[in-house]
Structures are given as structure tokens and as C-alpha cells.
Image: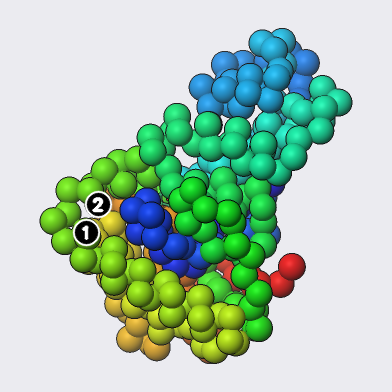
Amino acid sequence: MPGKVILAGEHAVVYGKMALAASIGLGVEAKVVKAPQGVQNQIIRKAIELAGGGRDLGVKIISEIPIGSGLGSSAAVSAAVIKAVRVYLGKSIRQDELFRLTMECEKITHGNPSGIDPATVVYGGLIAYRKGRPIERLQIKKSLTLLLVDSGRPMESTKEMVELVATNPQTERIVDEIETVVTKVRGGLERGRNVAEFLNQNGKLLEDLGVVGLGAMKLSNELRKLGCSVKITGAGGVVTGSGIMIVMNNNLVMIKGMLDKKHVGYIETIVGIE
Ligand code: MEV
């Protein structure tokens, strides 16, 4: 199962707004093994159980997605385990059922998730997501080349970050502003326009929301001085790292050189091509 990147609208999506997300080329593979592999974590056990597997089954996980960095590793692991168990049991699983069961697992880790992570991981491609609404596939004119830059692993969980946002007295206003920007990103993508500046505005609104730490903020400012658009993707983090940041620039060679010098990790990905 693939990981995901939220292009625009994280956190606001928890408040019922639209968010845009895409699956990425990094993924998770799960293999069912007969005897349980040591002590398996609660989520994996839950995923096995939801898929109809018994306590005699375990799974081996092979993941390319960095854990806890905003790229949907927890949803991808749960979905991969559920699917692998069903294949092992010789029972098929439809996408809507896989989404529903993955969501059950996400509730254990994230409390009250919007569902955007399991939706992107399960349905794949580029989607517009709104809580409780059918998933919309985006038809875009031009693919997007993104640099996914590592600002460091967050110490906080997604659940803690969602709770932090709820305590910000400005949240309602900022969430409304994010909604406006997300609509512009969607319109731009559908018309084949450059959406870099809108992503940057979304990035700044996430900073106002209080989900970006000092280290990520400093790196963002340096990148913006070089003409980049920058936004964190996923829940963020403030105590240490803020997870992965989306960086857009016409001259990615120059930006990669700068990041190499600073020993900052990154990967390049293209979204929007099915
Ligand atoms: C996490 O990938 C995205 C958040 O909006 C939480 C959620 O939607 O459940 C921060």
C-alpha cells in the first residue's frame, strides 16, 4: 500500500473542510506468517483481527515510508496488513471495506481522524476529500514535481497535534482561510496553473495554526528566501521536528545542493500521474 502526501488542507479537514492528497511512490508491504512475530503492536493485532485472522497469524512488515513523518505510514501499515490477511484467508476485500477497516485502526492511534490518510492510501491517485462525503478523483492538467524535505521526526502524535490545534483561539478563522486556499489549489490544478504560491500560503497558515516547530520554520524561511514555496504536510510537530515539508521550486537542482550541504534529507516525487 502506498504512503500519502497531503497537498493542501490538513487540520482544516478535521473541521469538515476539503483537503487534497495524493498517494506517493513509497509503500508498505505486509506478509502473513504462521506464528506471531514476537509481540506485535496493538494496531497490527487489531488489523489482523478486523480482517478475520486469528491469534495464530502474525505479519512481517516491510516499509519504505518513514514512520511518524506525515506520509501516512500508520494508515498504509494497517491497510497492508488487512489486505494481506484477506489474501492469506482467500477472501477478497472491496476498497470501501478496506477503507472502513483501516479507519477503525486509525481511530486507535489518532482518536478522531478525518479519514484522509486511509482514503488516500486505499483509493490511491490524487483525491479531494471531505469527511463523510464520497471521495472525488481530481483530473489535473499537469503533474506536480515536489521535493519532500525532512524537517525531523515530530515528537508528538497526530492526535496530540489535532488536540493542540483545538486549543488555538484563532483556529476557526485560520481554518476558514485554509479552506479558501485549498479551493484555489484545486482550481489551479484542474486548470493546469501553477499552484506553488497557494501551497506556500497554506504553509504559512499552518504556521499560524501553531503546528510548525522552530527548526522547520527556520529551514522554511531559508528556502523561501531562495524562492521556494514551502508547507509542512500532515499533522506537523513543535517540540522537535515537524515531519516532511513539501518544497516547490523551478530550480530543484540548486535547492537539492543547498539541502545536501546542510545534510537535510529529501526525496523527489511526482504526483498527478496515474
Ligand atoms: C494527518 O495526516 C492529517 C490531519 O489533518 C489529521 C486528520 O485529518 O485526521 C492532521
Q: Secondary structure at mark 2?
A: helix
Q: Is mark 2 within 8 Å of ligand 1?
A: yes
- Residue 91: image x %, image y %? 82, 27
Where residue 35 sits, quadrant-wise, is top right
Report the front residue among 131 and 28: 131
- Label whose residue precedes the other's in the sequence (2 or 1): 2
Image disc number at residue 153: none
Q: Amino acid at mark 1?
A: Thr
**Residue shown at 53% from the left, 72% from the top:** 147
Q: Which residue is mark 2?
A: 165
Q: Which residue is mark 1?
A: 171
- Residue 85: image x %, image y %? 74, 27
Q: Secondary structure at mark 1?
A: helix
Mark 2 Cα shell of 10 Å, populated few (<14), some (14-19), many (≥20): some
- Is residue 191 something one can see in this rendering? yes
**Height in image: 139 above or below 67?**
below
**Height in image: 271 above or below 250?**
above
- Residue 109: image x %, image y %? 44, 33
**Residue shown at 51% from the left, 81% from the top:** 187
Where residue 225 sits, quadrant-wise, is bottom left
Query: Do the numbered discs 2 and 1 sit on residues whose CB atoms are within 8 Å?
Result: yes
The answer to whether residue 206 is left or right of residue 262 is left
**Residue shown at 38% from the left, 54% from the top:** 16
